[in-house]
Image (cartoon, rainbow, N blue to C red):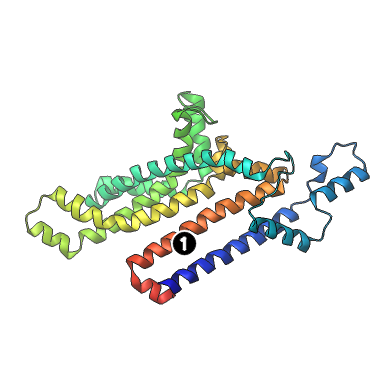
Amino acid sequence: MWRFLAGRILQTLLSMLVVISIVFALTRLSGSPIPLLLDVNATERDQEILTRHLGLDKPLLVQYGIYVRNLASGDFGNSVLTRRPVTEHIWERLPATVELGFVAMFLSVLIGIPLGMYSAVRRGGIADSAARVFAVLGQSMPTFWLGLMLILFFGVVLGVLPAGGRGDIRHLILPAFTLGYFTSAAILRLTRSSMLEVLGSDYIKFARLKGLHEQVVLWKHGLKNALLPVVTFAVMLFVQFLGGAVVTETVFAWPGLGRLILESITTRDYPIVQAGVLVLSSLYLTGNLLVDILYSYLNPRIRHAGG
């Protein structure tokens, strides 16, 4: 077990180093932020002073070494534009992204599991067909298009929900549904297939032969055993929510971390882009590591195969 755990942690650290290197290279390839920071009347001398102040006059390998060294000591640097520590910007925006992710995850589970279970129980019926159409639409519609249509209908035509921004619970409904629709469809399909497999097992047939009530068979023996892969999948989805909310936050002007990264890309604010991507990647890789450990605990054959 310890060998398996050490191997997975090493893989996670190597993956993080690859992410750090790629983000560093991409931010430098996007161009220099100097023209965006100086006035149009700035002289070449002004540009040289600012370039030296930001450390951009050094060779790229030296800049990379300084960046990795500062990260190792927990220093994310300061924003190029505001001169404030990057960690302040991250902590200001991260709660909004976590809030949106939690609500979207809650909606996904609330919609996906009951519909998936009902679809499995009514297999081949009208309800099953309707649920499958719902799932196909959810996994085929682009997120930005769905968000724009919801804004047009509920925000502009009906005027019953805010079209953007962060405030009370009404501001959460449209972005959370937009972000959660795709995953609710995925949870629906996984729950349906898992329930169909469980309902065809011998212990379910035996429970029915014992004369147990059908609701007891479904909820106590069926759903309980079918939920394990769904719960594991849902944990990974929540982590993906935090990283994949960039489009939704942009469409709904939601002041989260994803939108901060996008804004920083347009202004070439390197430190914020690097730190933001690093935080999201860390969450994703940590979630993957926890799921691997959970799987290896539940199924020892996995750790023996991978150890």
Residue drawn at 42 percent across, 60 percent down: 291
Q: Position of residue 301 (x, y in %)?
A: 35, 74
Q: How many marks?
A: 1
Query: On the image, which quarter does residue 256 sit in?
Result: top right
Horizontal side, residue 296 vs residue 14: left or right: left
For label 1, the residue is 289
Location of the C terminus by quadrant is bottom left
Question: What amino acid is found at the position of numbered circle 1 in the picture?
Answer: Leu
Q: Hey, which residue is sitting farthest top in the picture?
A: 159
Horizontal side, residue 187 vs residue 96: left or right: left
Q: Position of residue 82 (x, y in %)?
A: 72, 38
Residue drawn at 64 percent across, 44 percent down: 262
Q: Is 28 in front, or is 195? A: 28
Q: Is 73 in front, or is 154? A: 73
Q: Secondary structure at mark 1?
A: helix
- Can residue 123 be seen here? The reply is no
> Does residue 25 lie above or below 38 as drawn?
below
Q: Hey, which residue is sitting farthest front in the picture?
A: 73
- Can residue 35 be seen here? The reply is yes
Query: On the image, which quarter does residue 63 sit in?
Result: bottom right
Horizontal side, residue 174 vs residue 194: left or right: right
Location of the N terminus by quadrant is bottom left
Q: Residues within 10 Å of mark 1 (few under 14, many from 20)?
A: some
